[in-house]
Image (cartoon, rainbow, N blue to C red):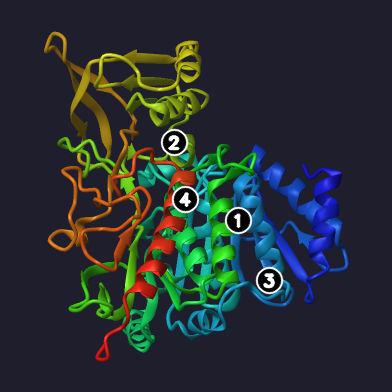
Amino acid sequence: MLDDSIKAQLAAYFERISQPIELIASLDDSDGAQQIRELVTELAAVAPAKLSARFDGQFARRPSFQITRAGADMGVHFAAVPMGHEFTSLVLALLWAGGHPPKVEPEVLDQIRALDGDFAFDTFMSLTCHNCPDVVQAMNLMAVFNPRIRAVAIDGGLFQQEVEARQIMAVPSVFLNDAPFGNGRMEIGEILAKIDTGAAKREAAKLNERAPYDVLIIGGGPAGAAAAVYAARKGIRTGIVAERFGGQTMDTLGIENFISVLETEGPKFAAALEAHVRHYGVDLMTLQRVARIEPATQPGGHATVHLDNGATLKSRTVILATGARWRNVNVPGEQDYKTKGVAYCPHCDGPLFKGKNVAVIGGGNSGVEAAIDLAGVVKSVTLLEFAEQLRADAVLVDKLKSLPNVTIHTNAQTTEITGDGQKMTGLRYRDRTGSAEHQLDLAGVFVQIGLVPNTEFLKGTIELSKFGEIIIDAKCATSVPGIFAAGDVTTVPYKQIIVAAGEGAKAALSAFDHLIRTPAPATA
């Protein structure tokens, strides 16, 4: 299962293990159990002095294996063969269990250790999901450092009956003590905030103590990261406040058009952005949502940024880089069946629909790429495009049309997503050429119809276009002096990573120019 190259790399990593580890497998007679047996055996053979394997586990969910420090009972379990995107989760769990320190702030570990209660987390994931490892790793981290926490990473493809019984139709999907806890990507701070009721209040108090900034960037995607680097390099006090670092790149599987980077994956790209920003000492505040902005009352004064948790931050200039999010179809049933058949990430959730009939709404590049990817997993794909023809690149359209299990409908207006109250069962669409109504029986639908700018909190403060984008000039200035904007949230055309990064750099240079030309008032 592990080739010689991987074994050599693992041997180097396992040199960091300071305390012996036991791998305890709980098996049955399934094919998955045989793969787990093989994986556990090979892992132990890489470093026999530090890892040992047992096959007498009594864990209820089989097949699975536990990672624990010898003589302890750590709650780290994989009900999976953690290869693909989850191989990193496996390696990190082994290192942490073996005493190697994680790359998190000491206060995070203190918060984990101080959690009072018994927490049993079941995380349903797929091995092709690039959003899942962050959640799996966060759960494993908590299970290593708090003996009252159990974390099980469950491959939905390996436990399809349980997936069906729990009606899980999107990953990652997390249950806490058998009750739904959360869906989608979650960082360790977000998870801790949900189970540590006093965390938000403590965090707000800390943020209120922050000194004013010269440049405060709202948003942590490519535009925000570039703005932070360019501002910090000017030697001015720079901060970023964002819900999550990386923005849309965290939901992007492949990136092949960022010049000088031949090929990478979204989460890796986001990690590189964060490392670059941290290199310049930028004050990074994540898991924070901005509620509103009060512009400065006099030239050169401080704008006030109000956060949802009650904290306030002040800065002489602000750069808005809040990006955009997936556009909804806005038809009856869509909100009712989100994560219950209605999905937005084919790479993450596609494997859950193996052998089933699904649809893709949207005929642009993202929609056609989604249909191509899904066609290799599901029984059939029906692609619905509102316009007269598909808008994707010709090479993608040709590939799509060559697939035998794909049906394409243009001039198709989705009118309703239907379901049985628990999960979606189909959708209705109207033929725009003849007004005929059609019903499709489906297990899932993937929405791929573009983006909506994240500007709701700015209404009444900044001038917006009819599409909700921030109107900017050639220097990224908004309608409010001292407030600039960059990236997908603005009126700049071509929503691309490289364009956003360039606009972020431009916004930072414009903010710096504003600072040197607008002296701070004596009362600021």
Please tell me whether mark 1 or mark 2 is closer to you in this view. 2
Please tell me whether mark 1 or mark 4 is closer to you in this view. 4
Residue 399 percent across, percent down from the top left: 50, 16
Kind of residue sitting beneath label 1: Phe
Residue drawn at x 46%, y 27% as measured from the top left: 369
Answer with mark 1 or mark 4, whichever residue precedes in sequence: 1
* Quadrant location of the N terminus in the rendered image: top right
Q: CA distance from mark 3 to mark 1?
A: 14 Å
Residue drawn at x 19%, y 46% as measured from the top left: 465
Answer with mark 3 or mark 1, whichever residue precedes in sequence: 1
Mark 1, other Cα within 10 Å: few <14 / some 14–19 / many ≥20 = many
Q: Is the residue under label 4 in contact with that under label 1 (CB below 8 Å)?
A: no
**Numbered mark located on residue 502 in the image:** 4
Q: Nearer the viewer, residue 291 or 63?
A: 291
Residue drawn at x 67%, y 60% as measured from the top left: 57
**Numbered mark located on residue 97 in the image:** 3
Q: CA distance from mark 1 to mark 4?
A: 42 Å
Residue 477 percent across, percent down from the top left: 30, 58
Mark 3, other Cα within 10 Å: few <14 / some 14–19 / many ≥20 = many
